Amino acid sequence: ERSNLAGVRHILLVLSGKGGVGKSTISTELALSLRHSGKKVGILDVDLCGPSIPRMFRVQDNDVHQCDSGWVPVFVDQDKSISLMSIGFLLEKPDDAVVWRGPKKNALIKQFVADVAWGDLDFLIVDTPPGTSDEHISTVEALRPYKPLGAILVTTPQAVSVGDVRRELTFCKKTGLRVLGIVENMSGFVCPHCSECTNIFSKGGGEELAKHAGVPFLGSVPLDPQLSQSLEEGRDFIQEFPKSSAFPALTHIAQQILDGTLQQSS
Amino acid sequence: QVALLDIDICGPSIPKMMGLEGEQVHQSGSGWSPVYVEENLGVMSVGFLLSSPDDAVIWRGPKKNGLIKQFLRDVDWGEIDYLIVDTPPGTSDEHLSIVQYLSAAHIDGAVIITTPQEVSLQDVRKEINFCHKVKLPIIGVVENMSGFVCPKCKNESQIFPPTTGGAEKMCQNLNVPFLGKVPLDPQIGKSCDKGQSFLSEAPESPATSSYRNIIQRIQEYCDQHHFQEEKII
């Protein structure tokens, strides 16, 4: 019997030790950028307590259906080039809290990894909650037979964030997960009125960490109110705001991932 | 006399923010000693138990719960006026355990933090529901990262836009107290990274007055509570 992940060419995880740094944002924008390069992308949202992915694609009210091979992922539009799975689709009411201890979370994650009928995908992006606990251990264990491409780690520039992401790097080392690189998010804000750049969350921590840890630095994404607005409204930022300040960095990250996979096959 | 307990086991930020990185926990006959920032501010965190900043705590729920129990049972806090518990995001093991373990001691309530956007509010509504479910009173909600005033031209930008009305509207809808907004100030991050008190470093910042107002409201809530409790007795 063919596994549900047999048609998925590359699996990558988006991790961070720290909360609120923009994992779901990076997962979403990476999916949109890869789609713009003609790829078919799936996002598996394993943040069971705080599932953000459905709203970022304006499909938070969608339901999930079953088929013979399992759950049918939610397509974000007619194009069917991006599909999603999240606990967000399984809640009766959007404000329902998922108050589960580890074992129950682990059981659902195993199902999410095995029972979603993704079909053929170029990339499956796995968006995670912050930390190095049940969700992360279970996801990596369940994905191991499918040999994930690796993990992208997201941090903000400050030391307090970098401090947690260092521990996430150790998690990757210990679990044998290759680190594709580090993204420094919320890296500076350019005032739309006078163009003065302010380093609201400090500067440079992500790049320094990448250097110190000997992993690739994938780039700095600036704070961009148009990006925040886009995510709020579930719009395609990559399609609609190519002149916006975060656009170059986000597309550059996607390009490096694509280049990496080309290198792999050659 | 204040105690700060950090139960974010996987991402313990408190030691760095308090300027206590590298400190270790000492054991004595009366239990674990908190690490003191000042005579009247003691701190406990898993961060003090790790030997390297690269050490990862890769634990499943039950092991995390075990450590939280130890923190509550074995730390010799002494007589304290306020025990503040910093938690990781979510509604899982750490949150269930802390409420359960502290149930006999009576928790005054929870302060819930959000940023202005709907993406944050949608998770905070779940956290509010969690509090209702476990009968944890809600002191109120704080809207953090609420607006940024450019230091050069003084114009304000909503970097994290409150597209659905922000925390204030959510609090109105859910009948939960709104404690206030804290604006973005680059000095906050800097102070935290250096382990210094932002309130002392930047007393003139609008963020400082925001923090102070919010803290005052929290104190008033706790004082009222205490008064009500004493009345009952």
Image (cartoon, coloured by chain):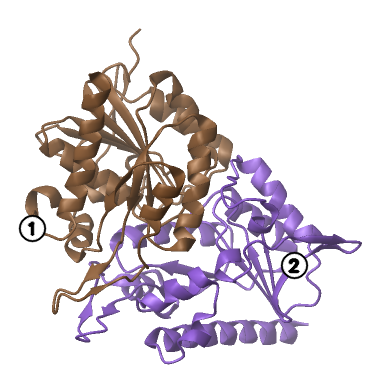
| B187 horizontally vs B227: left or right | left
Q: Quadrant of residue A244?
A: bottom left
- Residue closest to the eye, A208 or A74: A208
Residue lying at the far top in this picture: please name it.
Answer: A1
Residue lying at the far right in this picture: please name it.
Answer: B29
Subunit of label 2 = B
From what the image shows, is residue B199 above or below residue B66? Answer: below
Q: Amino acid at mark 2?
A: Pro
Q: Secondary structure at mark 2?
A: loop
Q: Which chain is brown?
A: A
Report crowding for label 2: few under 14, some 14 to 19, many 20 or more residues within 10 A (C-alpha).
Answer: many
* Alpha carbons under labels 2 and 1: distance apart: 52 Å
Instruction: Name the residue located 52 percent from the left edge and 61 percent from the top edge.
Output: B132
Residue lying at the far bottom in this picture: please name it.
Answer: B204
Colour given to chain B in the rendered image: purple
Q: Is residue A163 visible?
A: yes
Q: Where does the image place residue A67, in percent across and percent down from the top left?
A: 28, 21
Name the residue carrying label 2: B34
Considering the image in quadrants, where does the N terminus of chain A appear?
A: top left
Name the residue carrying label 1: A243
Instruction: Name the residue located 89 percent from the left edge and 64 percent from the top edge.
Output: B30
Q: Quadrant of residue A241?
A: bottom left
Subunit of label 1 = A
